[in-house]
Image (cartoon, grey):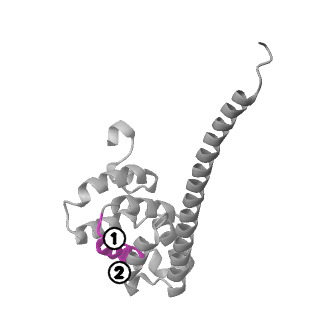
Amino acid sequence: MDQLYDASFYSWLKSEENVLVTAMYLHRIANEYPLVRIINALKWLISDWRLESDLRRAHLLRHLTNSWATQYTTTLITMVLSSAPYASTTPVQRERFLRAFTKDWNFSKLSEFFMYLTSPANIDYKVKCVMLQEAARKETLSAKLIKKKQEQERHHRRTSSNDVNDIKRLRLSTPDLDH
């Protein structure tokens, strides 16, 4: 790799620019190692990333933990939030990472996640409440939209068939002027 791409494997692997490829490979091998080793590897991997790379960190960890049990996911996220750079940053920065990581989760999954998230993660209770309320609102709105769409489809089907019947009746009741 060093000669072919003029980059060392070490620097390529640690680069936050390669997060998509790194996430894909990490996901494939993660189940072969104990959680403690994965946590240590991730600490090493993201230790030099800029604090502003919240979205990349979140993407990497979302992809990696996609099929994990919630307890393992929260153990990993607790580790990330309780170590550099999040250990010494503002609550807003931790919230930003957490929102990116849990993006598009439903209320149930988010609730279970917060239930297992331990205090070293240092996430404010109010933030958890707001995120859960937003997830609940989103689910309620989604359910209402689905119901409304189904009602419109039923109404459309009903009026469509009525329109066809009306057209047939109109043809039958209209005198044929050509004959």
Q: Is residue 80 above or below residue 175?
A: below
Q: Quadrant of the N terminus?
A: top left
Residue type marked 1: Thr
Asked whether residue 90 is in view, the answer is no
Q: Quadrant of the C terminus?
A: top right
The magenta region covers 68-81
Residue tagged 2? 116
Asked whether residue 21 is in view, the answer is yes
The reply to whether callout 2 and callout 1 are in contact (CB within 8 Å) is: yes
**Residue 147, how many percent across, how many down?**
55, 60
- 2 or 1: tag closer to the N-terminus: 1
**Residue 83, how many percent across, how many down?**
40, 77
Work out how far the residue at label 2 is from the one at label 1, CA to CA, in angstroms: 9 Å
**Residue 40, how many percent across, how many down?**
28, 69
Predominant SS of the magenta segment: helix
Name the secondary structure under disc 2: helix
Magenta span contains residue 9: no
Task: Say which residue appears at 68% left-offset and 37% top-offset.
Answer: 166
| Image mark for residue 73 | 1
Task: Report the residue that reaches farthest toward the right.
Answer: 177
For the residue pair 166 and 73, the one nearer the viewer reads as 166
